[in-house]
Structure formats: C-alpha cells, structure tokens
Image (cartoon, rainbow, N blue to C red):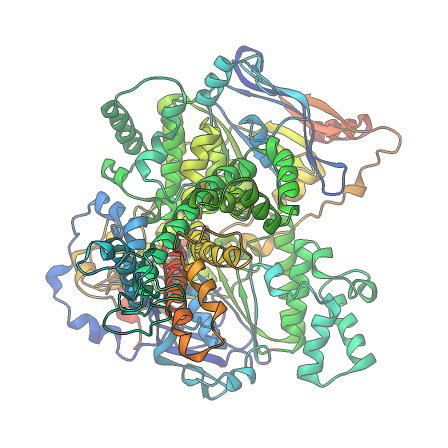
C-alpha cells in the first residue's frame, strides 16, 4: 500500500534524534493543559489604529518633520515679525533725512537688514509681509480647492446619474485656458487679495475634482461599498465614511502640492501684470521687482531673498505632501 | 413534495439581468431564471465562474437591476421602483454575506460602526447605549468578544472578519440571507467555523439562506435544495440528496463527477465527465423548464425529458 | 538517476523576512526530501510558509527575505547558499520551474503566446527560426491546445483561464526541468477545468519524467495528485508521509483538525469539527507546539517544548508529543477514525499511537 516503502530515510531530517530531544522533557508535562477558547480567539491583537499609524509613520520621517517645523516657524514668524521691536513698515518709503532723497537700492546692512528696493522700501519687512500674503493665499486657495474639488469629485464619481452632466461641465470649463479665465476675472474684479483667491479657486478645483472622481470610480464597487448599499446606507454617508477615508493619502498629496503651485501662479500673474496691487507685498510682487533689476549684479539680492523663501516653501510642501502621503498609505503600515 | 404547504419567502419569475457592454449592446448574465425559496430552508445556487450566480444574488439584494422578469418577496415585487416603506422593509429583511472578508469590510471604520451601520438606516431612533448593546449582542452571536467593537478590521483574521460580516447582517434581524460564496475565500481550517456558525444561527433564528457557491461538496453539506446554473440558465433543480443521487442534466453530472475528494483511493479511481453543450440537439425543439416529479426540475426538451424519465424508472440515472 | 533517489534534500531551513525593522521568521526549521519522479504535495493554510519554502528553492524570495540557516541540496549544490542572481539563472526556469496560481500574471499580455514559449526554446535549447516555431507548436499540442499553429499567434487575453494555465505549464516544462513546482495551479479555475489541468500535469510528468511539488490548501487536489504529502503549519512541517498514511492514518492534531473540518467528511446536520483561533504571529518567538493554543486537547508539554519529528513508519513522521510513549492515548476525531476504517485500520494504525514511536528509527 505504501509506495516507496523501500526508502529508509525519513522525508524530513533533523540533526538530533526524536528520543534524544524527548529525553530532555519532563514526564510530568504529559497531561492535558487548560484550554481557553477565548484566548485562541483573541489572537494577535496589535492595537492598530489607522490614524495613529499614520502619525507614527509621519513622525518617523525626520526630514519631513524638519520641514514641517521650518514651515510652521516661517508662518508663525510672518505674524510675529511686525510686532517685534525696531521693525519697519513694508510699504513705507524711507527717505534720507540728509538729502531728502529715497534710500534707493541700499545694500543689506545694519539699518536695512535685507537692504531696500528701488523705491526705498525695507526689503526685510516686505519679504515677511510678502511671505505672509503668499502663504495665506496658498493655504486659503488650497483649502478652498480641496473642499470644492472633493465635493464635486465625490458626487461626480459616485452618483452615476450625474456622471454625464458633470463630465460635460468639466469639459467645457477645462477647455477654456486657465490663463484666460484668470485674466478675465482679474479685469472684471478689481485686483485685490480677494480677487486673487476667487480667480484661482475658479479653475483650480477642476484638477482635484477629476482626480477624486477617478479614484472613486475605482473603489466605488468594491465589496465593502456594496455591503453598505445592502444595508441601505445613503450615498452621502457612503462617500464620507467609506470612500473619502480611503483617499486621504492621495488627496493630501494633491493639496500639499497645489499650495506651492498657487504661490507660483501668483508669481506668474504678477509677472504678466494681473497680480496683486503693488501696495500689497507678496512673493509674486517681490520676485517680479527683483527680476526687473537682476541684470545688475550688485542688486541681485533683491531677487535672491524672495526666491530663497519661495523655494523653501515649495520644497517644504512638496516634502510634507509626500511624507504624509506615504505615512497615510496603509500599505506602508505594518 | 409538499412544496405548496410551505411559505414562499422569495420568488424569481423569468429573471433576466443584463449588463451594458462597452461599444454598445448588452450581455445577458442571467436568462429566464425561475425558482422560489421556502421559509427556513437553505437553497443552494451552484455554478462555475461567469455562470451568473452572483448576478442573481446581487439582483435580489438590489445591487444589480433586473432587466426583465420580477423578484417577489413574500408575494410583493421588490425589483425596480418600490415605495419607501417596502424599501426599508426589504433592506432589513434581506441581507447579504459577501465572499471576500478582506474586501467586504471598511478598513477605515471600527467594528462598532461596521456592525451597526445598518441600524442608522432603518429609521428607528435608538440611544447610543441601546445601539452599543445591540452591537455587543450581535458580536457574541457570531462568537466574537464584545470588546472587539473598538478595533479596526485590520486586526482580525479572515474567519473573524467573515463573522463580523455576518454580525453586520444579523443585527438587521433579516429573514433571508443571501450568502455569496461565504467561505470560498477563507482558509480551509476556518471554513468549518463559518459553516457551523451559519447553521447554528439558522436553527436559532429560523433564517432562510440563499447559498451561492461553486463548490458542490460544501453545498451538499449545508443545503436542502440545489439549483445548478450554467451560462445564465438554471439547468437543474432538486432536493440536495436527490440531485446527488440522480443527476439528470449532463452538466450536473459533469460537475458532480469533478468534485475533489480528500480521499486518495477514491481520487485515483475518479473518472471526470466532460460536459459538451453540443450533446443537446435543440435544432428541432428548444429546451424547457420541466418537472420530472418530486420537485426535481431539469432544463430539457421533450425528447431528453423522456430519456431522463426512462432512465430514472430503469434505475440507470 | 533512478526513480526513488533523492533529488532535493532540504534540512533545517530557516527563512526570515525584514518588515519595517521587525523580523518575521516565516520558516522555522523545515526539512523535506524530494525523490526523483515522485509527486510531493505541501499542504497548509495561508501564512504557513508553504510558498515561501519552495520559493527559496528557486531564489524567488522577496527582496526583504533571506535564508537564515539550513541547507537545500540539489545536484550536489546547496541552494540555500546561492546569493548571486546569475547562479540562479542556471537553475530557475531551467532545472526547476514553477507554475503559479494566476495564469494571467504569469504571462506577458503584450506578447503572443507562441512568442513566449519560443523564448524558452531559444534561451534554453538554442533553437531558432522554423525549428523553434515547430517546437512551440508541438509543445502547445502536448498541453492540449487545439489548432496550435493558429492559436500560438494569439495573445493571452484571447485564451480562457484553463487554456492560459495550459500555456503557463507549456512554458514551465518547455525547458525540460527536473523539478516542476506548482503553486496552487488550479485554485483560480473551475472544478471541471481543475481536473483537466491536474491530469495534464500528471501526463506531462509521465512523459517528461520530472518531479513535481504541489503547493496547495485543497486536500482534494492533494488526494488526487500526491504520492507524498507534507503538512505545514506556522513555518514548520508537522506531518509527512505517503498520501495514504497522511489521509488514512494521520497523527498530528493539526492534520486531524484540517481533515475533519472538511464538509466532505462531515455528517449533514451536525456541526463540523472546527478549529478556533488563528495561527501564531510569526513576528514573535513560538514556544512549544505552534498549534497548541488552538488545540483543545493540547498537553502541558505542548506549551513547554517543541515536539521533535517522531517516526511512525519509515516514510511517515509527525511532530507531536502525542507520539511520545509517555503521552496519554488520544482518540482522534470521528472523521479521522472513519478515514482509518476506510483503509482497514489494522493494516496501518491499529497499534496504540505511542507504540509506533518506539519502533521509529533515528531521524
């Protein structure tokens, strides 16, 4: 009956004989042990929580943490800076009392830490004022785009009846070049911070909405969503409880990247003359002013300082976005 | 047998489920399906992948629309547009257990929410405390500890996750549960747990099951009656042991002959029959859903039917 | 080499994985012996390590995994010591090939089926042009694909699941391997197709004389194909023997539980034997018998010391303290007794469980 019975060798081979191993074991142990069915059921409980794991993963990323601190410090400082003693107004034109002339293009020094610009304004104060404006603009637009983009994207992706209609609306808006929309809005409304926010939000949400929609189409028919439908859960709650939590990581990445994008747009709009009024310092205004005189080597500091800040902000958001996206991706959780 | 005296919970009449295919046209996943499920029984629906068995289950819980025919729950039509109260009742009374416990639980929600999700939707106001008690009770019923409510699905093994899925259906106090391959994604050592659980809840609560599966050995163990489906059509329906003793349709016979047995001697003797659709001659007369007696139905034309009846009488089939 | 000689012999294999700074011991000292021409089936649930163990024989462990200790000798060479990818190329796909569960992922969707098989002939047999084409057609015919000269020009998506698996098998055996490892080859297929694929592999094995290793959780498949069976649990082989010995005269409580939980062996209307709990977390060190926490009839010793492989017969051994002479006699579950009866209990398992161990030779 037993095939291959001619072989003496066992299939599995150990280095020590079973008897030798068994001899080491106390005979008194050969009695039934207590059995706790619940213990078997409890299994390997590891106290996992999605958000806690995300935070832990994020905090482990030292580089990202450094950039987060930097960004926080930057933002905080833009608000604290005007309150510090001995600070100058970013818009005040400084006049040399001796000559009655403006302090034009004064190189960085003890009086003007970052020097002055072509009309005698203090660059140190302007840079912090400008950073404040640009960061606020970026954050505000980022949050607004996120809210609008997610709302539209979720409805677009989940409610099948509306798919066709929203796709058409998207196609229409998306086919008008963004620059034209921005220009039109900037002409219709007076240039101001508010105009800028509205103009950028008007088209900025489209990309995110499309992105969210595609993601939702991918996951909407997974079994756990079908299960929720069987339980009669309304679409709104399925979107909020079942779908969006799965997209946190990708949405956060998109939003984080859109913030430096917005600041970049602001620089560009200022460059083509549609940005914030000159009276409001912003990184866009500063870079634009610096650009005009960048051909004279001794004045390059006027371009250099705002560019450094702009780069820091861009890199920070980029690193943060990626770090958070990695940390919040459950595939990276153990 | 005494089918008429038993209460019909669910009835399918000429059910057809069609899907739109890219580039126009439709694909009929389910064609002209008729059967009814009696109260308290376990009705098995067996077929290979792509046979349309899952589409039937999903049409019953209204995830898929029926493109033609009707679905009746206790005599009332539940497919298509139905009044709000009936909708609420159907949501409660017909629940589903899904195939893949790894995919059928929301990973971002705690077990507490997953199990009580349905309670939020049936329009009964409950205090937070009552809700928690119900969750604890449902978890205990499926052999899980109430303390698991505060955990995420991620924590649990496949078998435990499937039991969470069962608890989520049970909390609705359903009458009919559509179980779509509830154990095929589970590890062998876990399957028995879940099968036992399904049986014991059925006994305790008088539930009715529609058990959808591809594995005939499991279906034989758990069901009272079986319908065999192939390419969207039901080819044979009979009481479980009757079907195994006297399979009539060649497809059923092929399926039964292929069941793997955990028995080397039997496996080595096994002869697998191959089903060739060309063995039917439907050029003159197409097949019809016919009763061979004793609640044994088969899809056949009159010539085949006669052969089946003769075979049965002579003890050949 | 003659039939029955060892072709692959693995001893005390330990395989570890590094997952985010934590070490998981996937294989905790497993050994097996594969004889020329036979069919070995490795059975276990997911996470038992059955795939990991065999993947280590063809150098296909994931990047974060490594063979920590132990040896696997194939043709006089220790596979466990091979580090260089170049050395693996001489073995993988040439001497040892593998068939995976999902035929779709194993095939390149952008190449015709013929081109993918041809590649093997060009690479391993130095055939080219018409000769290679001819070999491809012959191979496709051999694995049961109708009209091979036309079908070889088709792409994988034009094939059904069963036909795709045939193509994968054709690729795997085209290089005339000495060992064919089939990892759940029929899990994704319907039962009727499953039987055909198993028959195909058996026929090819007869014609091409290779040795087959099946990795599966399906005891029906095992019963159909295996000469020898190894049952794995938590990274160890807990019982091994001929198919008859393991199915009709199993000794390890895990094997008992696995077999008696099958609905095929159950009695309708009565609850099936079921195993509570889950396999141990292999991030932690396992003390004693890994199955003990799930075994309602575990002995105290099961929690204290790891059982050695006790010999039941020259070909049959199991790692359970129940085989120690000092252990109390333990009645297996009814389904196991029924299986014993099937083969005439007197022939194989008539004696008290403990007796067999006394007769067992050194391991």
Residue depicted at 47% across the width and 76% down the height:
C57
Q: Is residue A126 above or below residue A107?
A: above
Q: Quadrant of residue B55?
A: top right
Q: Position of residue C233 (x, y in %)?
A: 35, 60
| Quadrant (top left/top right/bottom left/bottom right) for the C terminus of chain B | top right
Quadrant position of residue C229: bottom left
C189, above or below C76, in the image: above
Residue at figure coordinates x 79%, y 30% from the top left: B304
Check the image and name the residue furthest to the right: B284
What residue sits 35% from the left and 40% below the top? B109
Q: Position of residue C119 (x, y in %)?
A: 70, 77
Q: Seen in the image, is C20 located left or right of residue A299? A: left
- The spot of residue B218 in percent (x, y) is 50, 40
**Left or right: where A285 falls relative to A95:** right
Quadrant location of the N terminus of chain B in the rendered image: top right
Q: Write down the quadrant of residue B232 in the picture.
A: top right
Is residue B48 visible in the rendered image? The answer is no
- Tell which residue pokes out farthest to the front in this image: A99
Seen as rendered, the residue at the extreme bottom is: C76
At 16% from the left edge and 72% from the top edge, which residue is drawn? A23
Q: Nearer the viewer, residue B177 or C65?
A: C65
**Count of number-bearing discs:** 0
Whole-percent x and y of residue B207?
Answer: 43, 23
Can residue A140 be seen by looking at this rendering?
A: yes
Observer-nearest of A300 and C125: A300
Q: Nearer the viewer, residue C44 or C211?
A: C44
């Amino acid at each position: 009956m037993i095939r291959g019975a001619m072989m003496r060798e066992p299939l599995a081979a150990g280095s020590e004989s079973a008897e030798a191993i068994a001899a080491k074991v106390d005979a008194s142990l050969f009695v039934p042990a207590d059995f706790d069915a619940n213990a078997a059921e409890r299994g390997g409980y590891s106290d996992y929580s999605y958000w806690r794991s995300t935070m832990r993963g994020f905090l482990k990323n030292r580089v990202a943490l450094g950039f987060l601190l930097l960004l926080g410090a930057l933002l905080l400082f833009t608000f604290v800076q005007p309150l510090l003693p001995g600070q100058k107004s970013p818009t005040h034109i400084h006049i040399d009392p001796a000559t009655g002339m403006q302090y034009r293009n004064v190189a960085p020094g003890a009086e003007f830490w970052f020097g002055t610009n072509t009309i005698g304004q203090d660059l140190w104060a302007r840079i912090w004022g400008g950073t404040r404006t640009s960061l606020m603009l970026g954050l505000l637009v980022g949050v607004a785009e996120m809210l609008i983009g997610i709302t539209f994207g979720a409805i677009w992706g989940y409610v099948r009846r509306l798919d066709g209609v929203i796709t058409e609306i998207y196609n229409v808006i998306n086919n008008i070049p963004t620059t034209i929309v921005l220009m039109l809005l900037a002409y219709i409304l007076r240039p101001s911070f508010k105009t800028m926010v509205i103009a950028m939000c008007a088209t900025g949400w489209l990309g995110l909405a499309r992105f969210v929609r595609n993601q939702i189409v991918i996951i909407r028919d997974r079994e756990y969503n079908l299960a929720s439908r069987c339980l009669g859960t309304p679409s709104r709650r399925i979107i909020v409880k079942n779908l969006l939590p799965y997209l946190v990581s990708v949405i956060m990445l998109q939003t984080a990247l859109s913030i430096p994008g917005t600041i970049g747009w602001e620089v560009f709009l200022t460059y083509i003359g549609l940005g914030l009024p000159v009276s409001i310092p912003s990184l866009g205004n500063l870079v634009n002013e610096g650009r005009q005189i960048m051909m004279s080597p001794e004045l390059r500091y006027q371009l250099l300082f705002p560019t450094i800040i702009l780069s820091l902000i861009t890199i920070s958001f980029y690193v943060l976005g990626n770090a958070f996206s990695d940390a919040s991706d459950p595939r990276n959780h153990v | 047998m005494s089918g008429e005296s038993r209460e019909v919970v669910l009835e399918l009449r000429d059910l057809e489920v069609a899907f739109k295919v890219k580039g126009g046209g439709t694909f009929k996943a389910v064609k002209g399906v008729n059967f009814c499920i009696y109260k308290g029984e376990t009705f098995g629906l067996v077929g290979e992948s792509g046979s349309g068995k899952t589409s039937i289950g999903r049409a019953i819980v209204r995830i898929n629309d029926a493109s033609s025919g009707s679905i009746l729950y206790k005599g009332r039509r539940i497919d298509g547009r139905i009044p709000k109260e009936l909708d609420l009742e159907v949501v409660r009374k017909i629940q589903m257990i899904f195939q893949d416990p790894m995919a059928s639980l929301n990973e971002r929600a705690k077990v507490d929410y997953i199990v009580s999700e349905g309670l939020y939707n049936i329009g009964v106001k409950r205090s937070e405390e009552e809700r928690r008690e119900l969750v604890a009770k449902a978890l205990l019923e499926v052999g899980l500890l109430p303390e698991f409510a505060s955990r995420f699905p991620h924590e649990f093994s496949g078998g435990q996750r499937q039991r969470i899925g069962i608890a989520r259906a049970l909390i609705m106090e359903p009458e009919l549960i559509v179980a779509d391959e509830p154990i095929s994604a589970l590890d062998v050592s876990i399957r028995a747990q879940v099968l036992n659980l399904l049986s014991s809840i059925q006994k305790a609560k008088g539930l009715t099951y529609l058990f959808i599966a591809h594995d005939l050995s499991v279906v034989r163990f758990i069901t009272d009656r079986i319908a065999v489906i192939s390419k969207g059509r039901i080819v044979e329906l009979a009481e479980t042991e009757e079907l195994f003793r006297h399979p009539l349709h060649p497809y059923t016979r092929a399926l039964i002959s292929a069941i793997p047995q955990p028995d080397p001697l039997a496996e080595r003797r096994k002869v697998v029959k191959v089903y060739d659709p060309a063995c039917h001659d439907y050029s003159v007369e197409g097949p019809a859903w016919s009763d061979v007696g004793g609640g044994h139905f088969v899809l056949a034309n009159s010539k085949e039917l006669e052969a089946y009846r003769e075979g049965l009488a002579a003890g050949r089939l | 080499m003659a039939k029955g000689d060892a072709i692959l012999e693995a001893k005390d294999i330990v395989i570890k994985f590094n997952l985010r700074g934590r070490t998981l011991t996937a294989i905790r000292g497993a050994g097996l012996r594969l004889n020329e021409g036979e069919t070995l089936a490795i059975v276990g649930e997911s996470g038992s390590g059955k795939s990991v163990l065999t993947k280590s024989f063809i150098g296909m462990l994931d990047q974060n995994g490594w063979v920590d200790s132990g040896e696997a000798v194939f043709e006089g060479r220790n596979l466990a010591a091979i580090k260089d990818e170049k050395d693996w190329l001489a073995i993988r796909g040439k001497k040892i090939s593998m068939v995976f569960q999902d035929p779709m992922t194993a095939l390149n969707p952008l190449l015709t089926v013929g081109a993918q098989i041809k590649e093997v002939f060009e690479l391993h047999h130095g055939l080219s042009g018409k000769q290679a084409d001819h070999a491809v057609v012959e191979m496709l015919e051999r694995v049961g694909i109708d009209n091979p000269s036309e079908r070889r020009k088709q792409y994988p998506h034009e094939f059904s699941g069963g036909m795709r698996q045939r193509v994968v098998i054709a690729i795997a055996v085209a290089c005339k391997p000495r060992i064919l490892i089939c990892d759940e080859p029929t899990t994704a297929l319907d039962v009727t197709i499953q039987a055909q694929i198993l028959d195909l592999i058996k026929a090819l094995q007869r014609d091409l004389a290779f040795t087959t290793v099946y990795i599966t959780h399906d005891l029906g498949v095992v019963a159909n194909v295996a000469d020898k069976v190894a049952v794995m649990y938590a990274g160890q082989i807990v019982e091994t023997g001929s198919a008859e010995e393991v199915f009709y005269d199993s000794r390890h409580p895990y094997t008992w539980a696995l077999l008696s939980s099958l609905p095929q062996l159950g009695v309708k209307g009565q609850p099936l034997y079921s195993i509570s709990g889950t396999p141990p977390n292999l991030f932690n060190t396992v003390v004693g018998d890994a199955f003990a926490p799930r075994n309602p009839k575990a002995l105290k010793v099961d929690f204290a010391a790891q059982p050695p492989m006790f010999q039941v017969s020259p070909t049959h051994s199991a790692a359970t303290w129940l085989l120690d002479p000092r252990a109390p006699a333990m009645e297996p579950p009814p389904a196991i007794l029924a299986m014993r009866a099937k083969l005439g209990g007197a022939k194989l398992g008539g004696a008290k469980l403990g007796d067999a161990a006394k007769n067992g030779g050194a391991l």
